[in-house]
Image (spheres, rainbow, N blue to C red):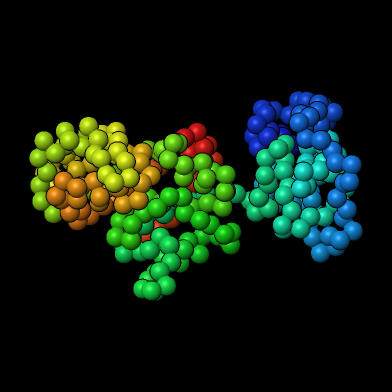
């Protein structure tokens, strides 16, 4: 097995390196019991070969997938499958070392969203959505992580990695976000202190990591950092104090920034950026 493929497979399975024997790799699946009634490939003539399914997910090559399959590292619908040439259907639950396998290779992008673009479709208004922009990126079915209001601008991450999307979408995980906010009237230092202490809204308290005026700009322009995943949280927070948001721009998401990413453009995330997001 190539060093590159070992690395990817080890990363996916939560183990570093590939120095263990195939028998020891199989023993790593101890919590999963092999069913007495193993699934039959007879009815899967129109399915996809299991090794190709795993390779398509970007875990390793087909040849290396065969090694992991024979070692008992792969299950289909809860059953260990060691048969070469076994075929799976799109509806089957395939797992590699206990983790679900996406038949598509995981892809990750970041978009600098323009103003007036819907994040989700609007059948009533028929407006353009971010998916119209991202359709040019890949054939994979991407979904945005988190939300961004129609009139808001800035960073929005897309992926077909359901595990990462679910993790980052949980309120308890909270991912660092910094917004450039422009209000319709100046803010006072008293209001800054009030925000720092936390604003209570109808769905609970909004905790703010930091807030400050933007240097050399009018007092109606501020920078605000939060990990909140509440809907329309910035607008609602200022509205509760009698202010209206004129412009909202997310300039930082996790460790991602808008540097060298013009408005309306997207780019693929680097491997390190994906790793950093997964650590949140």
Closest to the observer, 25 or 4: 25
**Percent coordinates x, y for residue 202 in the rendering:** 29, 46
Identify which residue is drawn at 70% across, 38% down. Answer: 98
User: Would you place residue 41 above or below residue 272 in this image?
Assistant: below
Q: Picture quarter containing residue 35? A: top right
Nearer the observer, 251 or 94: 94
Please indicate whether residue 46 sits to the left or right of residue 148 in the image.
right
Residue 275, relative to residue 44: is it above or below? above
In-front residue for pair 202/160: 202
Q: Decide: is 157 above or below 129.
A: above
Q: Residue at x 36, y 54 (%)?
A: 148
Q: Residue at x 31, y 64 (%)?
A: 116
Is residue 55 shown to the viewer in this render? no
* Residue at image location 57% in from the left, 44% down from the top: 163
Task: Report the number of discs.
Answer: 0
Farthest-out residue, front? 202
**In the rendered image, the vertical position of residue 17 relative to residue 105, given as above or below:** above
Tell me the quarter of the image containing the N terminus. top right
Q: Which of 38 and 201 is in front in this view?
A: 201
Residue 49 location (% of width, % of height):
81, 54
Q: Is residue 30 left or right of residue 85?
A: left
Residue 26 x/y as whole percent: 81, 31
* Residue 34, horizontal then vertical, whole percent: 84, 38
Q: Is residue 116 left or right of residue 277?
A: left
Whether residue 210 is visible: yes
């Amino acid at each position: 097995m190539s060093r590159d493929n070992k690395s990817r497979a080890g990363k996916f399975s939560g183990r570093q390196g590939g120095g263990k024997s195939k028998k020891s790799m199989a023993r790593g699946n101890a919590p999963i019991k092999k069913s007495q009634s193993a699934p039959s490939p007879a009815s899967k003539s129109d399915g996809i070969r299991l090794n190709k399914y795993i390779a398509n997910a970007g875990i390793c090559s087909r040849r290396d997938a065969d090694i992991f399959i024979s070692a008992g590292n792969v299950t289909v619908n809860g059953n260990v499958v060691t048969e070469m040439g076994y075929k799976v259907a799109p509806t089957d639950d395939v797992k590699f070392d206990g983790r679900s396998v996406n038949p598509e290779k995981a892809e990750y992008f970041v978009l600098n969203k323009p103003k007036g673009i819907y994040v989700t479709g609007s059948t009533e208004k028929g407006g353009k959505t971010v998916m119209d922009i991202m359709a040019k990126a890949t054939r994979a079915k991407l979904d945005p992580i988190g939300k961004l209001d129609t009139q808001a601008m800035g960073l929005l991450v897309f992926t077909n990695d359901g595990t990462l999307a679910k993790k980052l979408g949980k309120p308890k995980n909270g991912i660092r976000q910094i917004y450039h906010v422009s209000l319709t009237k100046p803010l006072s230092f008293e209001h800054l202190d009030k925000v720092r202490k936390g604003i209570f809204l109808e769905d609970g308290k909004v905790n703010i990591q930091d807030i400050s005026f933007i240097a050399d700009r009018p007092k109606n322009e501020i920078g605000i950092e939060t990990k909140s995943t509440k809907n329309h949280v910035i607008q609602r927070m200022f509205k509760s104090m009698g202010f209206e948001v004129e412009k909202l721009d997310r300039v930082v998401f996790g460790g991602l920034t808008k540097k060298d990413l013009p408005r309306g453009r997207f780019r693929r995330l680097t491997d390190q950026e994906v790793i950093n997001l997964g650590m949140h």
